[in-house]
Image: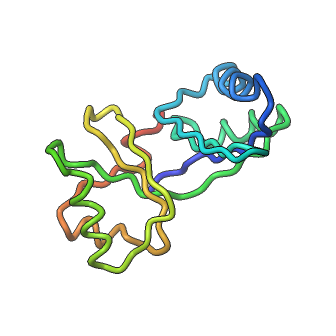
Amino acid sequence: MIDQLTVFLGNKKGRLTALCETLGNADVQMHALAVADTSDYGIVRIICDKPEAAVQALTAAGFTASLARVVAVQVPDVPGGAAQVFDALEKADASVEYAYCFTSSVGAATLALKTDSDVVGLLEDAGFHLLYPKDIYAA
């Protein structure tokens, strides 16, 4: 499992720019960025190389930021590859709260999953390669 940065943003012009600038000024490299919004606020999910430093920098800049544990699983590089992962989860009766894809230093698509249960062993037993902090974060 890896740490995902979650940031709540008011829907105001320039807030996403300010978030990205704050991370850049803190020398934090983003690997994935997913934005979901409502009429009042946005939820930004970020996979980055220095999650603890990112929370500290964002909090100091007045953002509401926290870390959440997510599963990062490499998606087979074939049509329907993501379906294979979701099928394994469905067969184990595991629900997915949200998911998004990104690329990592290993050069393959990676699926970040927030689930309602611990699925690490299940996915590894099903033959999927999971990524861990050493695979993504800065040394």
Left or right of 79, for residue 121: right
Depth check: give the residue in front, 50 or 93: 93
Residue placed farthest to the front in the image?
39
Residue placed farthest to the left in the image?
78
Left or right of 128, for residue 71: right
Left or right of 57, for residue 85: left
Depth check: give the residue in front, 51 or 81: 81
Left or right of 10, for residue 137: left
Q: Is residue 10 above or below residue 97?
A: above
Residue name at image x 51 percent, y 64 percent: 97
Point out the image quarter for the N terminus.
bottom left
Q: Position of residue 123 (x, y in %)?
A: 28, 66
Residue name at image x 85 percent, y 36 percent: 62
Depth check: give the residue in front, 111 or 139: 111
Q: Is residue 60 above or below residue 100?
A: above
Q: Position of residue 29 (x, y in %)?
A: 53, 27
Q: In the picture, residue 61 is in which quadrant? A: top right
Q: Is residue 29 above or below residue 128?
A: above
Q: Tell me how many marks there are.
A: 0
Q: Position of residue 50 (x, y in %)?
A: 57, 36
Residue name at image x 21 percent, y 60 percent: 84
Q: Position of residue 118 (x, y in %)?
A: 43, 73
State the colouring used for the structure image.
rainbow
